[in-house]
Amino acid sequence: MKGSSNYAPDRLVPMAVQQAVRQKSERKIPRKTHGWASYPDGHGTAWSLFSAQGRVLFHLAACADASVAEIAQKLGLTERAVWGVVRDLRQRGMILLRKKGRRHHYAINLDAPLLHPTIQGLTLRPVLGKLATKAKRERPDACD
């Protein structure tokens, strides 16, 4: 029986040592920030007053000629997330799409209603009107 067994007492390692080695070798994977932007103050906070839809609306009001990639980069979102938000805003009539060659240009529909029941009857005009009008006159620094 000696030769047929793979049992060798000198090759056994106590379970506690195996677990400790396994735990040390496991690499910790950093958590994703899930689309939250790092802010200039260095806090990289994960809090925003607006949803992704609101942030994209504000960005498009200021930078109507921004590409989806630029919007994603500026807002700390993925391009896929921005495409989904743009699709949702178009379906709800809040933005209008105009194509020039291969480039998309967006316009905010300031007469589109805000959809939340607590602010029924209000449109985008009081919220984004001044920003959109000013952005048409002069391009904001945030767009560069």
Image (cartoon, rainbow, N blue to C red):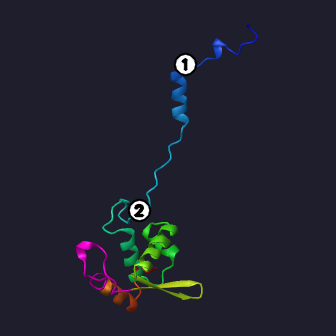
Q: Is residue 4 left or right of residue 52?
A: right
Q: Give the quadrant of residue 111.
A: bottom left
Q: Nearer the viewer, residue 143 or 96?
A: 96
Q: Is residue 123 above or below residue 88?
A: below
The region drawn magenta spans 109-127
Residue 4 position in % (x across, y down): 75, 12
Q: What element carries label 2?
A: loop
Q: Which residue is the site of mark 1?
A: 14
Farthest left residue in view = 118
Q: Residues within 10 Å of mark 2 (few under 14, many from 20)?
A: some
Q: In the image, what residue type sits under mark 1?
A: Pro
Characterize the local packing of mark 1: few (<14), some (14-19) or many (20 or more) Cα atoms within 10 angstroms.
Answer: few
x, y percent for residue 24: 52, 34
In the rendered image, the vertical position of residue 6 relative to residue 88, given as above or below: above
Residue, disc 2:
36
Under circle 1, the secondary element is loop
Front residue (pair 55, 142): 55
Q: Which amino acid does label 2 sit on?
A: Trp
For the residues marked 1 and 2, what is the alpha-carbon distance in whole angstroms?
A: 45 Å
96 left or right of 117 in image = right
Magenta residues: mostly which secondary structure? loop
- Which residue: 48% across, 49% down? 30
User: Which is nearer the eye, 122 or 108?
Assistant: 122
First in residue order: circle 1 vs circle 2: 1
